[in-house]
Image (cartoon, rainbow, N blue to C red):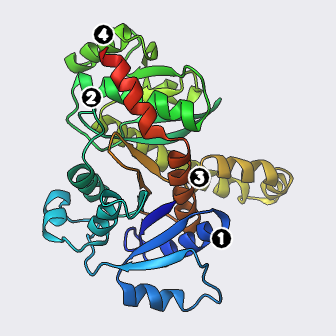
Amino acid sequence: MKIAVDAMGGDNAPDVVIAGAIQAAQEYEADIILVGKKDLIEKKLAVYKKIPKNISILNAEEVIEMNESPAVSVRRKKDSSINVAVKMVKEKNADAIVSAGNTGAVVCAASLFLKSLPGIARPGISVLVPTLKGMIQLIDVGANIDAKPEHLLQYAIMGSVYTNAVLNRDNPKVGLLNIGEEETKGPEFVKETFKLLEQNKNINFIGNVEGRDIFTGNCDVIVCDGFLGNVVLKVSEGLADTIKEMLKRKLSSNIISKLGALLTASAFRSFKKEIDYSEYGGAPLLGIDGVCIIAHGGSSAKAIKNAIRVSREYLLHNVNQHIIELVTNNKT
């Protein structure tokens, strides 16, 4: 198993990417290829006493910055770390790509070079969301901001497959994110999506879910368009950070609070871990003919390590083949 890691992608690259890759190489059975500026990567690796034998480097002289136009940069910067890593998967020189770089550029490169799986019109980014009843999938969170009902139907199918394979849940419950539970609520394309989901026999559709229901855990997969999903994701991340900071301030405000903090320290450590995105690694880009894991731009070394773990799990569970089979069944 070979995993191409975009060493130049992310707010803190290449340092944290290299650190995460080394951790992953020590823990998992996989060959990890760091893709990026070779001289710089070798310089950063030199500070480590021991480099795992399953780490190698592939040179890529260009970098797509976080603020660059995805489509333009992918076409102009042909020797970028993102393009080179994706092409490795295309040419079967790697089994998966992991990147914390420009999300739009990763989606664009994967869509352009790897194409979609048979029967899939648009790929979707799926993220794990912590809830009161465990983890659920939210799809799409930014790959396609101009989705059509048939795209959302395919997101539901792909999300169901991934949840079944990776979270080990049989017949996962699927909900459609909307402004109300009634099927008459929402914009026209959401109403049309409701009908498609309701008629489909290959998914366990339970109806509309509202924003306040996302974290109850009453369904296993929540489907929405990429614009709404990305807003939900960013609001959730911001809220989690705010709650952690508020708790920190309150628990250090006076002697009694500090004593209470000491007594409940283990509980708060557990809480912090449960809402920390770095624990869950990266988000798979479902629907492309390959394996592409997109990590958070601010990923720590731990997050990169876990993103590499997610790519291994995706490959080991043969998720793409299961998606193709269910999409094929949906047409027959």
Helix, strand or loop status at disc 1? helix
Identity of the residue drawn at 43% across and 46% down:
284
Cα distance between the residues tagged 1 and 2: 39 Å
Q: What is the CA distance from the residue labelled 4 to the residue labelled 2?
A: 13 Å
Residue for point 78% across, 47% down: 267
Disc 2, SS? helix
Whether residue 223 is visible to the viewer of this picture, yes or no, is no
Residue 166: percent from the left, percent from the top? 57, 38
Callout 1, which amino acid? Gln
Which residue is denoted by mark 1 in the rendering?
Answer: 26
Q: CA distance from mark 4 to mark 3?
A: 36 Å
Q: Nearer the viewer, mark 1 or mark 2?
A: 1
Depth check: give the residue in front, 68 or 172: 172
Point out which mark residue 151 bears: 2
Q: Earlier in the sequence, mark 4 or mark 1?
A: 1
Amino acid identity at mark 4? Lys
Instruction: Give the CA separation, mark 3 to mark 2.
Output: 30 Å
Q: Is residue 173 above or below residue 225?
A: above
Q: Residue at x 66, y 52 (%)?
A: 273
Horizontal placement of 39 versus 16: left or right? left
Nearest to viewer (mark 4 / mark 3): 4
User: Do the CB atoms of the residues marked 4 and 3 lie less than 8 Å apart?
Assistant: no
Distance between mark 1 and mark 3 Cα atoms: 23 Å
Q: Residue 117: name its quadrant.
A: top left
Q: Crowding at label 4, few (<14), some or many (≥20) Cα neighbours within 10 Å?
A: some
Residue that mark 4 sits on? 195
